[in-house]
Image (cartoon, helix red, strand yellow):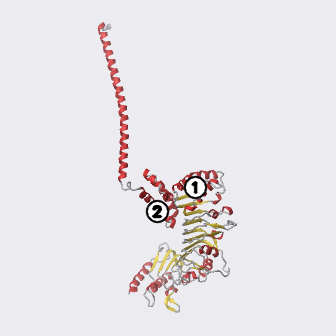
Amino acid sequence: MEPAHYLVLPFSNWALHETFIRSAEVSRKLVVDRITATRSALVAMEKSHQQLVAQLAAINADIETWRRRLLPVGRLPRDILSYIFELSIADETSAFLEEKSDDPIASLVGCRSQAFSVAAVSKTWRETALATPRLWSKVHLDFSRLATKNIDSPDLFSALSLGVERWTPYLALTLERSKATLLDFDLLHFGSELLSRHSEYRSAFMSVLSQAHRWRSFSLSTSSLGEEDEYIALYFQRQTPLLELFRITHAGYITGPLRPSLTMRFLPCIPLLRTLDIPADLLECVAFAAAPALRHLRLHCGVVSIAALCDILRGSPELEALSIRDVTNADTLSSGEHELCEFPKLTSIEIHDGTSEILESWGSRISCPSLRSLLLDEHCEDLWAAPTSSLFTTVAHLSVAVIRSYRGTLSAVLCRFPQLETLELLEGSVEPGDFTALNKPQTGDPSRWLCPRLCSIVFSGLVVFAGRGVAEDLLDFVQARAAPVENLAVEARLQSVTFANVVTASRVPLWLPDAIADVLAIAKPACML
């Protein structure tokens, strides 16, 4: 093994290396310092970059803001913008007030949503929306959402408190923002029995009643009218000088002693009221003020006497339309002599789910010389066994459900309407012989037909032809009434027969509409000669 060899440097070389080391350490320290300085500069540059990016975003936002302001909608004066906001809910408001929509309640809900939507677009729009009182004058409250628990639950009132707390701010907000403008209220699923049992519920409802002087329309639906001191009519004894529409919808019949012991005043000041829709039961226990502007009266669910009806009608000289549904007549046929009540401007009567006693009793005690439209739907079988009523003599448009009780019912119906121009059959069965009496002139007067002004027939509902002979009778009737006949006015000739439900009513021959159309098309040019 060879011995190890070591390099021995002279002392002067050791000193030189130490110098190099010290120099390298100095250089390293300088590099580290430069790295630290560079990192600090990088952090500062990143911070500066973020600031520049934020400034750029702010500049872009300013540019976008000014660009929007240059748009036509951004340059609109605020009063014009406010007017546009009002127009945006005009159709929904009209649908609610005039009931033009299939669901007028949904229309008012749309008004409420529109108000909050336009207020959330921009600062300018919000300021304008808050300064538009009419935008906040549509109040919709669904009382069924106050509590989701069963009414027998011990936690009901805590649930009610939570519900009231949720919509009380909305109610207060709309009342504040609407300022002094007229209000449209819609209250769904109201329960009068809870007013005495829940103070917050009662307080919220009373805040609605406190604005009665601002009501333009008020609609309330309930499943119960209440009993005695909780009877719903007790809450509507305030002055309502601006009210145009009032509606209480009660789903169900009156059962039990619900009425209070004393007659109360109800809506004591209604000079502008145009539409009144209430349960018929109210007529028997409340005193109505005069309604000089009332045009439409609707009664539903209850028992009403002719005396109570006349009391409210006497104070409504401008009444044009009367509608009753699920109403029972309280008068007896042997009620003695009564004063005849005349309503000169009443032009339309609708009776749904009525009885023959209504027409028999009312027809002998009410005179409507201007009556032009009559709708009779879902009546009992003996309806047309009632004596001829003076109500029928001026009717030009009749909508009726044909209910079978004996042969020739349709002819028996039409012979009561000498001025009839349009016949609309809503439902029922048409049998052979129904059109036979209509094919010939009146007995003893060859120059006049039965219903000499009849010019249009509409089968709008589920009308079934009970037998093959019905179609042939109808076709013969159309040929006889559409063909030109001497000494008969042109208005007396049949001009149209419409089948709106031929496919569903499978008993109506599909060839019949085309055959009738051909007869009418041939007869029309002949009538013009």
Query: Which is nearer the eye, 135 or 438?
Result: 135
Q: Which of disc 1 and disc 2 is earlier in sequence?
A: 2
Quarter occupied by the N terminus: top left
Query: Which is nearer the eye, 27 or 231?
Result: 231
| C-alpha span from label 2 to label 1 | 27 Å
Among the 4 quarters of the image, the one containing residue 222: bottom right
The residue to which callout 2 is attached is: 90
Q: Is residue 503 left or right of residue 24?
A: right
Question: In percent of the image, x 59 and y 59: which residue is there?
Answer: 210
Q: Position of residue 292 (x, y in %)?
A: 56, 72
Residue 133 in view here:
yes
Question: In percent of the image, x 38 and y 40: which residue is there?
Answer: 54
- In the figure, 482 relative to 380: above or below? below
Q: Position of residue 109 (x, y in %)?
A: 51, 59
Furthest residue in direction bottom, as rendered = 444
The residue to which callout 1 is attached is: 145
Q: Residues within 10 Å of mark 2 (few under 14, many from 20)?
A: some
Q: Amino acid under label 1?
A: Arg
Quarter occupied by the C terminus: bottom left
**Element assignment for label 2:** helix
- In the figure, 165 relative to 455: above or below? above
Total numbered labels: 2
Residue 122 in view here:
no
**Element assignment for label 1:** helix
Q: Amino acid under label 2?
A: Ala
Q: Position of residue 87 (x, y in %)?
A: 44, 61
Among the 4 quarters of the image, the one containing residue 269: bottom right
Question: In percent of the image, x 64 and y 57: which residue is there?
Answer: 195
Q: Is residue 389 left or right of residue 12?
A: right
Q: Residues within 10 Å of mark 1 (few under 14, many from 20)?
A: some
Q: Position of residue 25 (x, y in %)?
A: 34, 18
